[in-house]
Amino acid sequence: MPGQLRRGEVLAAAMGSPYSGYSVRTGTGRALFDSRQLPLQIVSLLVVDPALLHSDKAAVTKLLRTWQAAQEFAARHPKQSQLLMGQSSGLSATGFRDAERGMTYIPLDEQGAMLAAGGAIERNLAGAQAANLEMGVANPAAPLPRVNRAALDLALQPSAASLAAAK
């Protein structure tokens, strides 16, 4: 798609950071909307197939705990984290920091209310569905994804290692 953007063949695209920033900086695109304008309204989600959660709870739990550990590392070592993440994204540490500006990472232990029935995630999904129906780009018969906190609850349980370390 970068070539198509340069040639003006793409009319619009939804891009997340850092790619959206790169497109604006290089002149291959311009921002029509930036989700940072609506803090905590546009969220990135980890969606897990219920069959995977049932068949490999340990892998999903490890993924969530690893994400949390990475967030904690970034809070304790921001410069090192920005350097590492920048390198993996093809950015400098400053470029990565700029790309993250305005983003909020919510710790696992604070996500329960968002995932509760009637919580922010259900409301955001319903709002997105309504907007897409209004634009005529969604199937009115398509159900909304089910939101639950099963994977979160597993990740928040003490691990065997942490229980052993506490003894």
Image (cartoon, rainbow, N blue to C red):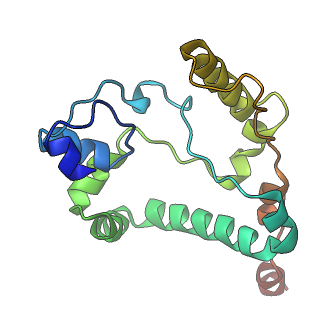
Pick out the residue farthest to the top.
Answer: 134
Q: Residue at x 76, y 33 (%)?
A: 144
Q: Is residue 64 above or below residue 166?
A: above
| Rendering quarter of residue 159 | bottom right
138 to the left or right of 17? right
Measuring 14% from the left and 44% from the top, which residue is drawn there? Answer: 6
State the image coordinates of residue 63 (x, y, percent, origin top left).
65, 69
Between 135 and 148, the one nearer to me in the picture: 135
Task: Using the image as rendered, state which of residue 162 and residue 13 is in the foreground.
Answer: 13
- Point out the image quarter for the C terminus: bottom right
Given residues 107 and 63, the one toward you in this image is: 63
Q: How many numbered marks are there?
A: 0
Point out residue 67 in the picture as x, y percentages from the top left corner: 58, 64
Instruction: Pinpoint residue 139: horizontal percent, then vertical percent.
Output: 68, 26
User: Which residue lies at the image location 85% right of the left edge and 33% below the top edge?
Assistant: 117
Q: Nearer the viewer, residue 35 or 112?
A: 35
Q: Is residue 76 above or below residue 131?
A: below
Q: On the picture, is 33 further left or further right than 127?
A: left
**Residue 40 drawn above or below residue 134:** below
Q: Position of residue 2 (x, y in %)?
A: 23, 51
